[in-house]
Image (cartoon, rainbow, N blue to C red):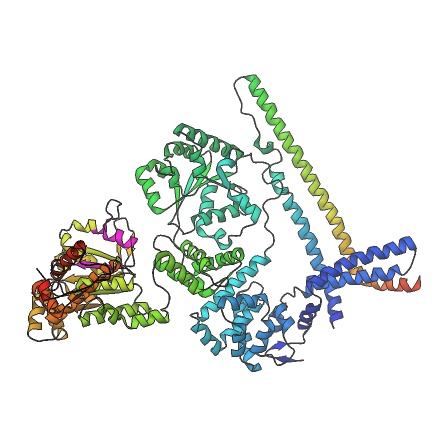
C-alpha cells in the first residue's frame, strides 16, 4: 500500500511540487536581482551622483557631461545585472525542464539499471 | 478498518505519518547525499572500469533519491487531505498515536515530548506528570476532546489540527484538569490564549524568508555618509536581523502614517503617552517600506533615527547646529529615500539639559519639503509645541495613538515574552504575563500599555527562580521597585494581619471600636477582597481632641506601610477658601506640598485630612470623587491615584455630644447613628460625604486609667530614646497618677501629657545625666516627689 502511495505521489503531487519549486526559484531570482526596480530605473544616474548646473555655458556643458556619464555608468551596471539575471533564469529554466522531463523516468530507470547490471 | 473516536488509525495518511518516524528529515538529507554519491560512483565505475556493477549503484542512488524526495516533500509535510479527523490531524499527532485504545491520557503521554506540548504545559506552569495522573484513560472520553480540538483548529489557515489544538481539546474536556488550572489562578480562556500564542509562533516559523528588494534596491538612491554619523538606520537593522513586527505593520496608525508620507506630508507627529508603542510603530512602518509592500512613492525608503545627543554634542553653537542640520537634510534630500525620525522629538524643540530648541532651524527645513520627518511626541509635549509655535505645529500632520485593548496588549506581551525568553534563556509562565498586565495597570500611571507591562516583565527577570518567571517574580519586581505589598500574605504576615488589633494596641490605648474597624479594612485589602478601584480604606474619625485619632493614623502608616513617614497630613483649616482648591490640586514643580504631588510621589500612604469640618465645602466635594473613584484629576487632565492609600479624615465635630453621652454612661455604638444625623442636620457634613466613608468611627474621651496607660507608653518611648546610653527609667504608680492629674485636660484629652512628661520626667533625667548621677547601666525610679511640674 505504501509503495503504491509512493508511486501515486511521484507521478501526481510530487511532480507538481517539483514544478512549483522550479517556478519559485526562478521568481526568487527576479527578486534577488531587483529586476523590476532595475527596469524602472534603467536610465537613472548612478546613486544620484549628479553635478549641479552652474552659471555659464561651460558649466552647463560640464554638468550635462557629468550627469550623462553618471546615467551611463548606471545603465551599464544595470544592464549587466539584468543580463546576469536573464542568463541565470534561462539556465534554471533549462535545468528545471530537464528535471521535469527526467522526473517520471527515474522509477523505470531503476528497473533498467538493475536489468543492465545483470545483463551486461 | 480500525476506526474508533472517528480516527482511522490505519488509513494511508496515518501509515505515512508513522513511516515518517523512520524516514525523518535527517534520513531524507542523508538519502539525498547518498543518491548523489551513488550515481556519480556508478557512472565512474561504468565509464572508467567498464564494470556493469556500476548500474546497481546508479539504481541504488535513484532509489535513494526517490525515497529522500518522498520523505522530505510528502511524508514529513503531510498536508490536510480532507475534512475528516484523520485527514486534518497533523503529522506529529498521527505519527505518535497508538493503533488502538487511545484515551486522553494515552494521547497526552504520546505527545508529551513534542515541543508544542512543552510550550503549552510550561506556560501553564503545570507538571506533565500531574496532568497525566489526572486525565481519563477511558477511550470514549477522547471523542469530545477531538471534537473540541477540531473546533479550536478551525481558525487555522489550513484547518490542520496541530498538537497544541489537540491538547487544548483534551484539557478543556477534562473537568478535574480544569479545576487544577483554576487553582493555578488561570482560566479556560487562558489555555486557548496560550494556544493562539503558539499558533503565531508556528506561523512566523513557516513564513518564507523576508525579501528586501534585492541587490539593486539602493542603486537609484544617493549615499548618506555624513548622515550615518548622526543617525541610526532602523531599516538597516530590519534588513540585518529580519525583525517581524507582525500585525503592527498593518495597524490603522501605521497605514495612516504611510498614506500621509505617500501624499507628501512634510512632517508627521506620532502622539501618545510613553510606552504606547510610538517607536514600535515606526519600526513596523520601516519594515513595510523596506519590504516594498507599499505605495510606490515610498517603497524601499529608509527610516533613519536622528540621535539628539550626538547631534547636539557636535554643535558648539547655534550656527554649528544649523550647519549640521543643513548638511544632514541636504544629504537626506539628495539620497531621495531617507525619512528622518526624531524619537523624543521634544529634545529638538525644548531648551533644557540634553535638549536644544532647534525650532528656528527645523521649521524652514520642514517647510521646504526637502526631506520628510516623523516625530514622536507625548501629548503634553505636542500641546506645548502647539501653544508655543502654532506655525510649526501647522506644518505637522498629527497621528494620535489610542491605547490598545486588553486582548491586543496581551498579544504584544506574549510576543515580547517570546523574545525575552529567547534572549535570557528563561521561561515566562502565562500567569506572569497576566500579573504583569494587571499590576503594571494598577501601579504605573506614568506610562501606557503595552510598554509598562513589558517593562515590568523585564524587571521580573532579576526575581526569577531557576530561570522561571512566574507571578511571584512579577510581584517581587513591583514590590521591590515601588515598595508596595502585592503578593498574597505569607503565613507570618497572615498571622500578623490576624492579630492587627494587638499590634495597634501596643501603640495606643483603648478605642477598641476604631481599631477593630480599621483592622478589618486592612485585612480585606490584603486578602484582595476590597474594591480595587477605590482607596484601600476610608474612615471618618470623630471625637474630642487628644483621644488618639492621629495616633491611630500613625499606627496604621507604621504597621501597614512599614514606616511612620508614610503619612500625608493636610491641615484642612488651611483650605478654607475656594481658591485653595488650586493649591490642593496643583501639579507645578513650585508647589511640592500639593496633595496630588505628594500622592504621586508616595502613593502607598495614609492620607490624613485633619479637622475636615474646617475645609471649604467645595473642597469637601472633591473628597466625594476621591472616595468614589479613587483618583483626582488636575487641570491638565492628569490623574493621581489614591487606590493604594488609606484615607482618614478627623473631626472634632460632635466632640461635646460624645463627651456628654459617655458621661451619662452610654456606649459609643448606642448613639453613633444619632450623632451622624445631628451632624447632617446641623449642616456640618453632607450626607453624601458621610455615606462614602467605609466607616464613621467614634472616639471616646479617655478615663484616668487609660490616661495612666498612655503615660506608660510615653515612658517606653523615653526609654527607647535612652537605650543607647544604657539608662532606664521607671515611674511609681503614684508618680504616674500625679502626671495624669497634672497633664490631662477635659478639653485636650491626653494631648498635654507629653508636655507634662517633658517637664516632670525628661528635665529631671537630663539633669541627672549632666551631673553624672545617672551613669550607663543606671535604673532610675521616679516617685511622686520627684515629679516637679
Please report the residue visible at 9 percent of the width from the left and 72 percent of the height from the top.
B662
| Segment tinted magenta in the rendering | B584-610
- A45 or B22, which lies in front? B22
Dividing the image into 4 quarters, which one contains the C terminus of chain B? Answer: bottom left
Q: Is residue A83 left or right of residue B700?
A: right
Does residue B410 show up magenta in the picture? Answer: no
- B124 or A88, which lies in front? B124
Please report the residue visible at 54 percent of the width from the left and 60 percent of the height from the top.
B201
**Residue B689 drawn at (x, y percent):** 18, 63
Is residue B425 shown to the viewer in this render? yes
- Look at the picture and state if B644 lies above or below B398: below
Q: Is residue B572 left or right of residue B138?
A: left
Q: Is residue B445 left or right of residue B685?
A: right
**Residue B110 drawn at (x, y percent):** 61, 73
Please report the residue visible at 23 percent of the width from the left and 49 percent of the height from the top.
B586
**Residue B446 drawn at (x, y percent):** 35, 52
Amino acid at each position: 500500500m505504501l509503495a503504491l502511495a509512493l508511486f501515486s505521489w511521484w507521478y501526481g503531487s510530487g511532480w507538481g511540487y517539483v514544478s512549483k519549486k522550479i517556478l519559485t526559484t526562478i521568481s526568487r531570482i527576479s527578486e534577488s536581482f531587483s529586476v523590476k526596480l532595475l527596469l524602472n530605473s534603467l536610465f537613472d544616474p548612478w546613486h544620484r551622483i549628479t553635478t549641479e548646473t552652474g552659471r555659464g555655458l561651460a558649466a552647463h556643458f560640464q554638468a550635462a557631461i557629468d550627469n550623462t556619464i553618471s546615467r551611463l555608468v548606471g545603465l551599464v551596471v544595470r544592464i549587466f545585472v539584468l543580463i546576469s539575471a536573464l542568463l541565470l533564469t534561462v539556465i534554471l529554466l533549462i535545468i528545471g525542464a530537464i528535471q521535469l522531463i527526467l522526473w517520471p523516468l527515474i522509477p523505470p530507470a531503476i528497473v533498467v539499471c538493475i536489468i543492465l547490471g545483470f545483463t551486461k | 478498518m480500525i476506526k474508533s473516536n472517528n480516527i482511522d488509525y490505519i488509513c494511508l495518511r496515518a501509515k505515512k505519518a508513522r513511516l515518517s518516524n523512520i524516514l525523518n528529515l535527517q534520513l531524507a538529507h542523508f538519502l539525498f547525499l547518498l543518491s548523489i554519491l551513488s550515481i556519480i560512483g556508478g557512472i565512474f565505475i561504468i565509464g572508467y572500469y567498464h564494470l556493469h556493477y556500476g548500474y546497481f549503484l546508479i539504481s541504488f542512488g535513484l532509489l535513494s533519491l526517490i525515497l529522500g524526495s518522498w520523505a522530505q516533500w510528502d511524508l514529513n509535510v503531510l498536508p490536510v487531505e480532507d475534512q475528516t479527523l484523520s485527514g486534518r490531524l497533523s503529522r506529529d499527532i498521527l505519527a505518535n498515536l497508538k493503533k488502538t485504545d487511545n484515551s486522553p491520557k494515552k494521547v497526552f503521554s504520546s505527545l508529551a515530548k513534542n515541543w508544542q506540548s512543552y510550550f503549552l504545559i510550561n506556560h501553564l506552569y503545570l507538571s506533565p506528570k500531574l496532568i497525566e495522573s489526572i486525565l481519563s484513560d477511558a477511550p470514549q472520553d477522547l471523542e469530545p476532546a477531538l471534537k473540541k480540538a477540531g473546533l479550536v483548529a478551525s481558525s487555522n489557515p489550513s484547518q490542520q489540527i496541530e498538537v497544541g489544538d489537540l491538547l487544548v481539546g483534551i484539557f478543556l474536556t477534562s473537568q478535574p484538569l480544569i479545576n487544577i488550572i483554576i487553582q493555578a489562578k488561570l482560566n479556560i480562556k487562558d489555555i486557548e490564549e496560550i494556544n493562539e500564542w503558539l499558533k503565531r509562533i508556528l506561523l512566523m516559523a513557516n513564513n518564507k524568508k523576508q525579501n528586501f528588494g534585492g541587490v539593486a534596491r539602493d542603486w537609484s538612491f544617493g549615499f548618506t555618509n555624513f548622515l550615518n554619523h548622526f543617525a541610526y538606520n532602523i531599516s538597516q537593522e530590519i534588513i540585518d536581523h529580519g525583525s517581524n513586527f507582525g500585525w503592527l505593520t498593518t495597524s490603522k496608525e501605521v497605514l495612516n502614517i504611510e498614506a500621509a508620507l505617500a501624499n507628501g506630508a512634510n512632517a508627521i507627529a506620532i502622539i501618545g503617552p510613553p510606552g504606547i508603542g510610538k517607536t514600535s510603530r515606526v519600526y513596523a512602518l520601516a519594515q513595510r517600506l523596506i519590504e516594498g509592500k507599499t505605495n510606490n512613492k515610498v517603497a524601499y525608503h529608509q527610516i533613519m533615527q536622528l540621535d539628539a545627543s550626538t547631534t547636539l554634542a557636535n554643535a558648539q553653537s547655534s550656527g554649528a547646529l544649523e550647519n549640521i542640520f543643513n548638511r544632514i537634510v541636504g544629504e537626506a534630500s539628495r539620497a531621495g529615500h531617507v525619512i528622518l525620525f526624531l524619537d523624543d522629538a521634544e529634545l529638538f524643540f525644548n531648551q533644557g539639559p540634553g535638549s536644544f530648541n532647534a525650532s528656528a532651524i527645523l521649521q524652514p527645513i520642514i517647510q521646504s519639503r526637502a526631506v520628510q520627518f516623523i516625530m514622536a511626541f507625548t501629548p503634553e509635549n505636542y500641546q506645548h509645541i502647539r501653544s508655543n509655535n502654532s506655525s510649526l505645529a501647522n506644518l505637522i500632520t498629527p497621528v494620535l495613538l489610542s491605547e490598545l485593548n486588553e486582548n491586543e496588549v496581551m498579544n504584544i506581551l506574549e510576543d515580547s515574552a517570546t523574545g525575552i525568553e529567547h534572549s535570557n534563556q528563561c521561561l515566562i509562565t502565562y500567569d506572569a504575563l497576566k500579573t504583569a498586565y494587571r499590576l503594571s495597570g494598577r501601579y504605573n500611571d506614568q506610562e501606557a500599555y503595552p510598554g509598562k507591562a513589558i517593562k515590568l516583565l523585564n524587571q521580573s527577570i532579576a526575581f526569577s527562580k531557576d530561570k522561571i518567571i512566574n507571578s511571584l517574580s512579577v510581584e517581587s519586581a513591583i514590590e521591590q521597585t515601588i515598595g508596595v505589598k502585592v503578593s498574597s500574605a505569607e503565613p507570618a504576615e497572615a498571622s500578623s494581619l490576624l492579630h492587627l488589633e494587638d499590634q495597634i494596641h501596643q501603640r495606643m490605648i483603648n478605642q477598641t471600636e476604631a481599631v477593630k474597624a480599621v483592622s478589618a479594612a486592612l485585612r480585606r485589602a490584603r486578602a484582595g477582597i476590597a474594591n480595587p478601584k477605590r482607596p484601600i480604606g476610608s474612615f471618618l474619625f470623630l471625637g474630642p481632641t487628644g483621644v488618639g485619632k492621629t495616633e491611630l493614623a500613625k499606627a496604621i502608616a507604621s504597621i501597614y506601610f512599614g514606616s511612620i513617614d508614610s503619612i500625608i497630613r493636610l491641615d484642612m483649616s488651611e483650605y478654607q477658601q475656594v481658591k485653595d482648591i488650586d493649591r490642593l490640586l496643583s501639579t507645578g514643580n513650585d508647589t511640592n506640598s500639593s496633595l496630588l504631588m505628594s500622592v504621586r510621589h508616595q502613593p502607598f500612604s495614609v492620607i490624613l485630612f485633619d479637622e475636615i469640618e474646617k475645609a471649604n465645602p467645595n473642597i469637601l466635594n472633591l473628597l466625594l470623587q476621591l472616595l468614589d473613584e479613587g483618583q483626582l484629576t488636575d487641570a491638565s487632565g492628569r490623574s493621581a491615584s489614591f487606590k493604594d492609600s488609606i484615607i482618614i479624615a478627623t473631626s472634632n465635630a460632635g466632640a461635646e455630644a460624645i463627651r456628654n453621652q459617655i458621661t451619662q454612661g452610654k456606649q459609643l455604638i448606642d448613639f453613633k447613628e444619632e450623632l451622624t444625623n445631628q451632624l447632617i442636620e446641623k449642616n456640618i457634613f453632607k450626607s453624601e460625604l458621610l455615606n462614602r466613608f467605609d466607616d464613621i468611627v467614634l472616639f471616646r474621651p479617655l478615663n484616668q486609667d487609660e490616661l495612666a496607660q498612655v503615660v506608660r507608653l510615653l515612658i517606653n518611648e523615653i526609654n527607647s530614646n535612652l537605650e543607647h546610653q544604657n539608662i532606664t527609667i521607671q515611674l511609681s504608680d503614684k508618680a504616674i497618677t500625679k502626671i495624669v492629674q497634672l497633664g490631662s485636660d477635659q478639653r485636650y484629652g491626653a494631648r498635654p501629657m507629653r508636655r507634662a512628661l517633658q517637664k516632670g520626667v525628661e528635665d529631671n533625667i537630663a539633669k541627672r545625666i549632666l551631673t553624672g548621677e545617672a551613669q550607663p547601666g543606671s535604673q532610675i525610679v521616679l516617685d511622686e516627689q520627684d515629679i516637679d511640674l
